Image: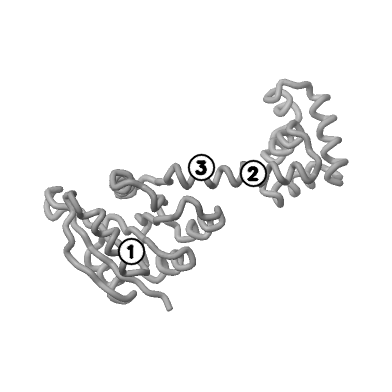
Amino acid sequence: MLQASAAIVVASGVGGDGHRLAIVADRQLSGAALTALIVDGSRYQLVQQTRGVAATRQALHDFQPAVVIIDASWSERTSLVDALGCDENVLILLDPYDHPAVFMKAAGARARGYLSRTATRQGLHDAIERVRGADDYLDAAIAGRILGAIRQASNTVASRAGLSARERDILIRIAGGQSTKEIGRDCAITPKTVANHVNNLSHKLHARNRGQLVLYAAQQGLTTI
C-alpha cells in the first residue's frame, strides 16, 4: 500500500512569507531526517507535518510549494508523484550506486531534478535553488554512473559482434544519420575507406542495407551514446 508523510518548510526572510518546500517520503524516519538536514542552521522553518497520501496531497494543494523533494523506495517514486499530483518542480533523491535502470524508472516521474543521497547539505540546497529556478538538475554522481553503464554496454555489444573500435564508431555515426562523406570527414578517412568499413559491418551483422544497420544499433542501445 502506497504511503507518504510530508513536512512543509518555509524560508524566512525571502520576501513576504518566503518560498515553501515540501519534503515527501514513504518512510517517516527518512522524511524526518531530511527535514532536519534542511532546517538545521538554515533559513527554513518547519510549519506543518502530515501523514498519509490524502493529507499530503491536501497539504501540497494548500501550500503550493516551490519545490517538492521526494525520498522514496525505487518502486514507489513514480506512483507517489502521480498519486500526489505534483507539478514539474520535483527533486527526487536517488542512490548513486543504483543500477541505471533505477534512474530510468525514476525518470518516468517527470521530475525536474535528481540528487544523490550522498550529497552534502550545501549540495542539497544548491539543487533546491536550481529546481526552484525551473532549471533541470542531475547530480554528477548519478550522471557518471549512467554514462559509465552506457559506455560499458556499448563496448560489450561491439565486442560480441566482433566489431573493431573504428567499426563501432562508424556504426554509431550511421545510426546518427551521417552520410559516407560526413563520416569520412569527421574520422579523417576517405569515403572509399568508410564504404569498406560499412561493407565489413554489413557482413558481420548480416545486414543487407544501412536501414538494418541503424535498426541493429538502436536495438543494442548504441544510438544512446
Q: Secondary structure at mark 2?
A: helix
Task: Locate residue 200: give its quadrant.
Answer: top right
Are there few (<14), some (14-19), or many (20+) residues within 10 Å of tag 3?
Answer: few
Query: Front-most of 89 and 3?
Result: 3
Q: Marks 2 and 1, how far apart in space?
A: 33 Å
> Which circle marks residue 144 in the picture?
3
Residue at image point 16% right, 57% down: 45
Query: Front-most of 69 and 18?
Result: 69
Residue type marked 1? Ser
Mark 2 or mark 1: whose residue is earlier in sequence: 1
In this picture, residue 9 sits left or right of residue 184? left
Mark 3 or mark 1: whose residue is earlier in sequence: 1
In this picture, residue 166 sits left or right of residue 21? right
Residue type marked 2? Gln
The number of numbered discs placed on residues in the rendered structure image is 3
> Which circle marks residue 152 in the picture?
2
Q: Contact, CB < 8 Å: mark 2 with mark 3?
A: no
Residue type marked 3? Gly
Residue at image point 36% right, 47% down: 119
Residue at image point 21% right, 59% down: 9
Whether 125 is drawn above or below 183: the answer is: below
Are there few (<14), some (14-19), or many (20+) residues within 10 Å of tag 1?
Answer: some
**Image depth: mark 3 or mark 1 in front:** 1
Residue ID for mark 1: 30
In this picture, residue 222 sits left or right of residue 56? right
Are there few (<14), some (14-19), or many (20+) residues within 10 Å of tag 2?
Answer: few
Query: Front-most of 95 and 19?
Result: 95
